[in-house]
């Protein structure tokens, strides 16, 4: 666990991280690293880790957030199902960087038949020298539901970061049962915490990080293509085949409740490796992080327009800037069906 005078664990699901009011605070979102650390993935892993180093050199972050599928215990691609070994190697790499980092689980970190379940991986991640992580409140769905409150020297909350497990697959099976979502008990916990913050500071604004996109992301995209000016295009594109969104069949209430609550203004996800879209819908900016993946999608390492990271900067005046940090010189901003940027 990251131990520092400026980082404290308050309880099972809350950390505070002290930041300087007089300088920008930079968060680098990295998603879908799909590191195999096995006999079949050594070359691709080297490329992925070199990519991460390059992004960190470019962005110089104060905090790194990994939004799921960091490791890939899938034997046909990596040559191992030992996600304990993978998690330890992942931590060793990021600890050497000496930058605080945190993470949420994706749907591939614990493949069927892998060595560890999420609870066991959580115990490992809690031991990372620079890792800020908790399994969260007992009894909640998922593992790793917690908050990192960015605070000033007086302890006043400047920006809460909500970390959520978007879970894995639906009932009745594994991958072919469809994707799961953020459950209602997680939503209730989150909104209760944000309500308490709002009572202390009515102007507080928060960010949420999770792996799988919400159904409303697709809904907003389709409205934007139809010319709905209430959806504001910010950057990126949907480059998955057939404009695919890896969303749950379940509706889920997280987005609707967040709109009602009014505190969360930014949401960040991963999961769909070719999607980089960022847009504003109903007052919330939803952003796909740029993927790192060299191993998960067949042939993705040959594609360059989607690979990279996402730099989130909280400025000293409280405003937030979100930018793609591509590994290559070109980023696609093509939105199918739209002749020019909406909004």
Image (spheres, helix red, strand yellow):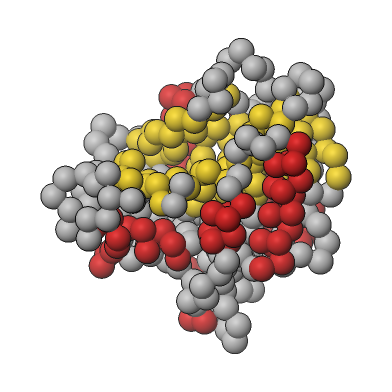
Query: In this view of the protein, can residue 44 be seen by the observer?
Result: no
Q: Please provide percent x and percent y for residue 287.
A: 43, 47
Residue 83 figure quarter: bottom right
Quadrant that contains the C terminus: top left
Q: Please provide percent x and percent y for residue 240.
A: 30, 60
Instruction: Name the residue nearer the viewer: 85 or 240.
Output: 240
Residue 115 figure quarter: bottom right
Q: Viewed as shown, does residue 291 lie left or right of 222?
A: right
Q: Please provide percent x and percent y for residue 90.
A: 62, 45
Seen as rendered, the residue at the extreme right is 11
Q: Viewed as shown, does residue 233 lie left or right of 151?
A: left
Position above or below: 243 against 283 = below
Seen as rendered, the residue at the extreme left is 339
Question: Residue at the spot x=24%, y=47% of the render?
Answer: 342
Instruction: Name the residue nearer the viewer: 246 or 327.
Output: 246
Quadrant that contains the N terminus: top right
Position above or below: 151 against 248 = above
Position above or below: 74 against 328 = below
Q: How many marks?
A: 0
Question: Residue at the spot x=58%, y=42% of the render?
Answer: 207
Question: Residue at the spot x=81%, y=57% of the render?
Answer: 137
Q: Viewed as shown, does residue 339 lie left or right of 127?
A: left
Question: Residue at the spot x=36%, y=58% of the render?
Answer: 220
Query: In this view of the protein, can residue 139 be seen by the observer?
Result: yes
Seen as rendered, the residue at the extreme bottom is 172
Q: Please provide percent x and percent y for residue 203.
A: 63, 35
Instruction: Name the residue nearer the viewer: 122 or 193.
Output: 193
């Amino acid at each position: 666990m990251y131990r520092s005078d400026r980082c404290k664990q308050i309880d099972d699901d809350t950390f505070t991280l002290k930041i300087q009011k007089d300088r920008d605070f930079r968060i680098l979102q990295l998603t879908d690293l799909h590191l195999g650390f096995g006999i079949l993935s050594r070359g691709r892993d080297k490329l992925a880790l070199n990519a991460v180093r390059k992004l960190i050199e470019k962005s110089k972050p104060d905090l790194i957030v990994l939004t799921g599928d960091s490791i890939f215990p899938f034997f046909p691609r990596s040559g191992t199902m030992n996600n304990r070994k993978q998690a330890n190697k992942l931590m060793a790499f990021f600890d050497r960087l000496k930058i605080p980092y945190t993470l949420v689980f994706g749907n591939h970190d614990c493949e069927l038949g892998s060595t560890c379940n999420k609870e066991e991986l959580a115990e490992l991640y809690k031991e990372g020298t620079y890792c800020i992580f908790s399994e969260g409140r007992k009894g909640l769905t998922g593992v790793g539901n917690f908050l990192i409150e960015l605070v000033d020297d007086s302890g006043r909350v400047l920006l809460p970061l909500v970390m959520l497990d978007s879970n894995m697959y639906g009932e009745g099976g594994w991958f072919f049962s469809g994707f799961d979502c953020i459950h209602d008990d997680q939503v209730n916990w989150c909104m209760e915490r944000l309500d308490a913050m709002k009572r202390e500071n009515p102007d507080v604004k928060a960010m949420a990080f999770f792996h799988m996109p919400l159904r409303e992301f697709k809904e907003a995209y389709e409205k934007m293509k139809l010319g709905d000016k209430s959806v504001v295009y910010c950057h990126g594109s949907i480059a998955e085949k057939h404009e695919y969104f890896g969303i749950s069949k379940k509706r889920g209430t997280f987005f609707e409740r967040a709109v009602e609550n009014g505190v969360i203004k930014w949401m960040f996800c991963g999961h769909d490796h070719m999607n980089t879209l960022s847009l504003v819908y109903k007052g919330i900016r939803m952003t796909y992080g740029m993927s790192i993946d060299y191993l998960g999608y067949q042939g993705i390492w040959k594609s360059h327009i989607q690979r990279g990271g996402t730099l989130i900067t909280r400025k000293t005046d409280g405003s937030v800037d979100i930018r793609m940090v591509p590994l290559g010189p070109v980023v696609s901003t093509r939105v199918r069906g739209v002749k020019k940027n909406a909004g």
